[in-house]
Amino acid sequence: MLRPALFLDRDGVINVDRGYVHRVDDFEFMPGIFSLVRGCRRLGYRIIVVTNQAGIGRGYYSEQQFQALSAWMQTRFRAEAAEVDAVYHCPHHPEHGIGIYRQDSHDRKPKPGMLLKAAKDWSLDLSRSVLLGDRASDIRAALAAGVPHRFLYRSNDPPEDAIAVAEFDEVIQQLQLLS
């Protein structure tokens, strides 16, 4: 049976965006993120992180550093009874990538590649899924993937195809109305 997913951007949604975060010492969870994930899991959502990581492509940090930080992050979520099912990332950048990382990838948001891969890997029902991001590129990726419920976190100027939310509780309230 297909399940819906809560797709989460990482920097600016899961953690404070300090620019190219790749070390545990620089990672600060956003207030309320664990409660959001627990609430969505209770509603039957898979939790999938989809994150552009051009810092890899720019040579600021390695794939191994990103993977180590992601493993640590997932361990912290598990410790909070708020398990994240998977983390998808795109290390490419079409202009600023170095070597193999300089490419226009189908995975780089605003393109839908990461969401479509996750849907295939996890048997997700995109028509009942949700994306929570902090940039218009997140919203456009969800729109391109057929994700109907799109939330833009802490934005005063959301696109008309997204709902602006200032607190994670607002997302849970909206999802409860859909259930």
Image (cartoon, helix red, strand yellow):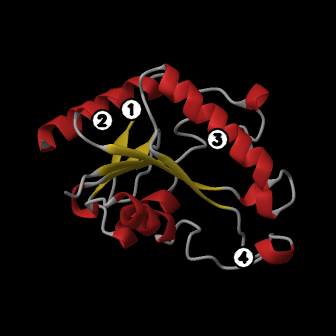
Measured Cα–Cα span from mark 3 to mark 4: 24 Å
Quadrant position of residue 51 = bottom right
Left or right: where 95 falls relative to 10:
right
Q: Position of residue 49 (x, y in %)?
A: 50, 48
Q: Earlier in the sequence, mark 4 or mark 1?
A: 1
Q: Is residue 68 left or right of residue 36?
A: right
Element carrying mark 1: helix
Which label number is shown at residue 70? 3
Q: Against 32, is 150 above or below? A: below
Q: Earlier in the sequence, mark 1 or mark 3?
A: 1
Q: Which mark is residue 176?
A: none
Q: Residue 176 appears in which quarter of the rendering?
A: top left
Amino acid carrying mark 1 in the image? Val
For numbered disc 2, what is the local secondary structure?
A: helix
Q: Nearer the viewer, mark 3 or mark 2?
A: 3
Percent coordinates x, y for residue 87 in the rendering: 54, 49
Please, what is the three-letter code of the amino acid marked with disc 2? Cys
Cα separation between marks 2 and 1 = 5 Å
Q: CA distance from mark 1 to mark 3?
A: 16 Å
Q: Which residue is mark 4?
A: 94
Of residues 18 and 41, which is closer to you in this image? 41
